[in-house]
Image (cartoon, rainbow, N blue to C red):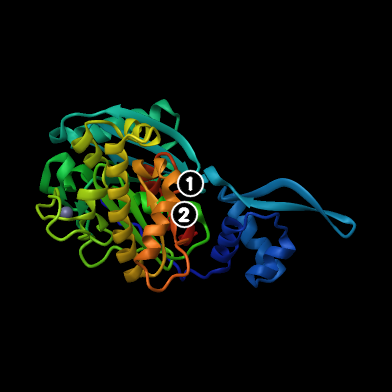
Amino acid sequence: MLHIPRVQLKADSARSRIYRYLYESREFCVKQTLAKQCDVSMPTLYQNLAELMEDGLVRYSGKEQSTGGRRAQGLEIVPDARYAVGISVMESRLRFSAADLRLNELAYHEAPFADIARLTEAVPRELDAFLDDRGLERKRMLGVGITIPGIVTPECDRIVMAPTLHLRNAPLLALAQDIPYPVYIVNDASSSGYAEWFACGESRNMAYLSLENGVGGAVLADSVPYGGDNGRSGEFGHICVEPGGLPCSCGRRGCLEAYCSARRITEELGVSPDDFFVGVERHEPAYETLLYDMLRHLAVGINNIHMALDCDVVLGGILSEYLQPYLPSLRRYVLAGNPFEPDAGFVRLSTLRKHTAPLGAALFFIREFVSGV
Ligand SMILES: [Zn+2]
């Protein structure tokens, strides 16, 4: 069944405040601190803690600390009290991640997948096998987030366009109907950005730019993903960085995706990103020329994104894994085109390396649960 997760930022019961404080605080926490931080009396705290413990959501941490003569026990949330599953639909495989409430990956699985026409059969079948094989209890599961490499309507009922899956205006409701859990369907780059934002843990606003065969992204504003009116926010791949330039998969010319995708490397040089960056390290002229052309156009795209959103721009996706040695050059290009910033520290590389799209899809259900306890 289709379900669009919502984060309840204003849930403000004592129970909710206590749980969220324990969830957000990574430090040793005793009852006295908890009562003070959550602004509740000790009797209220005891009553709510008893309920949270009975529900299996909170436990003693097993750590003790001296509080002036007495030893006090610490408290913590139970991370695996619930979990959510994320599924990435890719051109030739399905990727499954199960994540606990702290987004720790509990299990991962890849299944080959070739026939997009059979998506609605393949996903429920492989999901069942995944849950059985990994011994994941169904009653603790919050929901299933599914990522699609394309634009999905905000209602999750239709794929507007997914060039790598060769789909346009394709219905999605059958996919949700055949899965007996709450299902949310989201763009893969938006999902990866959400996971990255959560992993960073400190910045409220972030623009995420995913550099894969396609180029996409996500906007995280005030702690929630900003989807826009049509669910197309963060489609940074189709920002124009060179009017009249290289042809793009969207049918126009000069888009960021046409200049800064892994596909460009394969099409122009016939090599994988891995071989490409080896060639760049060896100073092969054609490879270096292409890399610096990509970096210059990437800098134009980054400046446009930063000018519009005024927040960190985090680079993710397969190409970001190779960019560390070239980050100083990229930042120099960015700075040359930016009239306001003293440095280009706002350009960062993703900290998450693996399974970002399925983990981000699971995160939608996790944050909904945590905000509603
Ligand atoms: Zn385009």
- Relative height, residue 216 to residue 92 (above, below): below
Q: Amino acid at mark 2?
A: Phe
Does label 1 or label 2 sit earlier along the sequence? 1
Which of the numbered marks, if any, corresponds to residue 198? 2
Task: Examine the image and state in which quarter residue 352 appears.
Answer: top left
Q: Amino acid at mark 1?
A: Leu
Which of the numbered marks, if any, corresponds to residue 55? none
From the viewer's perspective, tell me whether residue 79 is left or right of residue 336.
right
Q: Which residue is depicted at the point 20% across and 60% down? A: 240
Task: Examine the image and state in which quarter residue 114 appears.
Answer: top left
x and y percentages locating residue 196 in the rendered image: 43, 51
In terms of secondary structure, where does tag 2 sit? Answer: helix
Residue tagged 1: 103
x and y percentages locating residue 92 in the rendered image: 23, 31
- Relative height, residue 359 to residue 116 (above, below): below
Front-most of residues 359 and 46 = 359
x and y percentages locating residue 91 in the rendered image: 22, 35
- Relative height, residue 225 to residue 82 (above, below): below
x and y percentages locating residue 263 in the rendered image: 22, 40
Contact between labelled residues 2 and 1, with CB atoms less than 8 Å apart: yes
Q: What is the count of numbered marks?
A: 2
Q: CA distance from mark 1 to mark 2?
A: 9 Å
From the viewer's perspective, tell me whether residue 168 is left or right of residue 307.
left
